[in-house]
Amino acid sequence: MDIIGAQLVNSISYGLLLFVITCGLSLVFGILGVLNLAHGSLYMIGAYVSYSITVHSGQNFWLALIIAPLAVAVCSLIIEMILLRPTYQLGHLSQVLLTFGLAYVIHDMTAAIWGSDVLSIPLPQSLSGTVTLFNQAFPVYRLAVIAIGLILAGLLWFIQEKTRWGAIIRAGLSDKEMICALGVNIQLVFTVVFFIGGYLAGFGGVIAAPILGLYPSMEF
């Protein structure tokens, strides 16, 4: 039973880590209907930017957690406004081709800036210890990832299902013309959602970096 319990905790930790990384993709595709295959590239940018911040700030993980997701959110906003917005009327095929090509461009730019070596970010000191569960030592950071994933899932559900903002987003996806006729700037709403999706990608990059590391092709 101890082995089963330990594997269960490990599985939940890794599953929620993947959720934190990909929830931005689910948010953008599920709510906006926009298929962004460059989401992994945004996640990668978040990880590498957080690495640079920690290197130049004396291993300050929390500073990276604040700045890196915002930087990625700005990048995603630029991508949405300049590249993706003209494809909204063209269907998913155009979005797939555009964002898949963009992923390769970002891959080469990242390699040119940070190189192709495998890099890592140290755990924040406050979360670097271990606790004993099922007669085994578990890193506190992995348990923190579980908590972060559950809190994030609950927060996204609450915003989407229980707030006026969530109702506007869902109504805009179902009937864009009607929600515009009611005076809602649905294009602005969609842009904000894309911004949030980019922020979550960068957030996932920072959270995952101490566990998964940074390496070429991590976005794929």
Image (cartoon, rainbow, N blue to C red):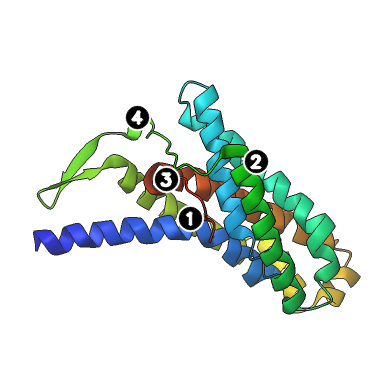
The residue that label 4 is drawn on is 126
Kind of residue sitting beneath label 4: Ser
First along the sequence among labels 3 and 2: 2
Contact flag, marks 3 and 1 (Cβ < 8 Å) = no
Mark carried by residue 58: none
First along the sequence among labels 1 and 4: 1
**Residue at left 82%, top 70%?**
87
Q: Is residue 29 left or right of residue 18?
A: right
Kind of residue sitting beneath label 2: Leu
The residue that label 3 is drawn on is 213
Kind of residue sitting beneath label 1: Val
Q: Nearer the viewer, residue 164 or 125?
A: 125
Contact flag, marks 1 and 2 (Cβ < 8 Å) = no
Residue 127 image offset from top left, x and y in percent? 33, 35
Does residue 87 appear in the picture of this structure?
Answer: yes
For the residues carrying marks 3 and 1, which lies nearer the camera in this image?
3
Kind of residue sitting beneath label 3: Gly
The residue that label 1 is drawn on is 20
Label 2 and label 4: CA atoms lie apart by 23 Å
**Residue at left 65%, top 59%?**
103
The residue that label 2 is drawn on is 70
Label 3 and label 2: CA atoms lie apart by 20 Å
Helix, strand, or loop for circle 2?
helix
- For label 3, count other residues whose C-alpha is less than 10 Å away and answer few (under 14), some (14-19) or many (20+): some
Q: Is residue 36 above or below residue 142?
A: below
Helix, strand, or loop for circle 3?
loop
- For label 2, count other residues whose C-alpha is less than 10 Å away and answer few (under 14), some (14-19) or many (20+): many
For the residues carrying marks 4 and 3, which lies nearer the camera in this image?
3
